[in-house]
Image (spheres, rainbow, N blue to C red):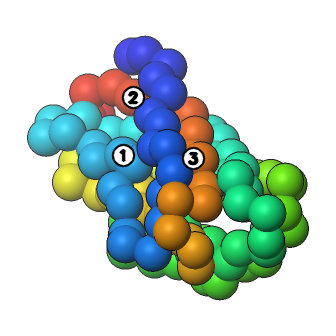
Amino acid sequence: MAFNRHTASAVGTSPITVLTVAAGQEAVVIGINLANLSASQINVSVQLAGVHIIKNSAIPAGSALSPLDGKVILKAGDTVIVTSSIATSCDVIVSALEQAES
């Protein structure tokens, strides 16, 4: 069992996989932070295990958003994917507790 941090810099209009849970593992996502790097508002979408937790949520210029309210359990092969409305506009941090599947 280990706490891990997964990051992606300058996420843009192409979906970026920030975390993929390895085979034989599970993860408890305990935090997600999205920071707007641009001088304009961006709209960001985050999917966990193929399901949106936010879709096109606005983040004002120079601001950040923590869209996760509570914890989410991911199983082997599940992903965290982030997309922004503007190229190279969003930094992402995902904090997770990862361990062997029980």
Amino acid under label 3? Val
- Name the residue at the top extreme: 2
Amino acid under label 2? Glu
Residue 68 horizontal/vertical position (percent) = 70, 56
Where disc 3 sits, the SS reads strand
| Earlier residue among tags 3 and 2 | 3
Residue 35 horizontal/vertical position (percent) = 71, 50
Nearer mark to the viewer, of 3 and 1 = 3
Q: How far apart are marks 3 and 2 (CA)?
A: 18 Å
| Earlier residue among tags 3 and 1 | 1
Q: Which quadrant of the structure image shows residue 78?
A: bottom left
Nearer mark to the viewer, of 3 and 2 = 3
Residue occupying image coordinates x 59% and y 47%: 91
Q: Which quadrant of the structure image shows residue 38?
A: bottom right
Q: Distance between the residues labelled 3 and 1?
A: 11 Å
Q: In which quarter of the image is the C terminus?
A: top left
Q: Quadrant of the N terminus?
A: top left
Q: How far apart are marks 2 and 1 (CA)?
A: 11 Å
Where disc 2 sits, the SS reads strand
Is residue 22 shown left or right of residue 69? left
Amino acid under label 1? Leu
Residue occupying image coordinates x 43% and y 16%: 2
Residue corresponding to mark 3: 92
Residue corresponding to mark 1: 19
Where disc 1 sits, the SS reads strand
Residue corresponding to mark 2: 98
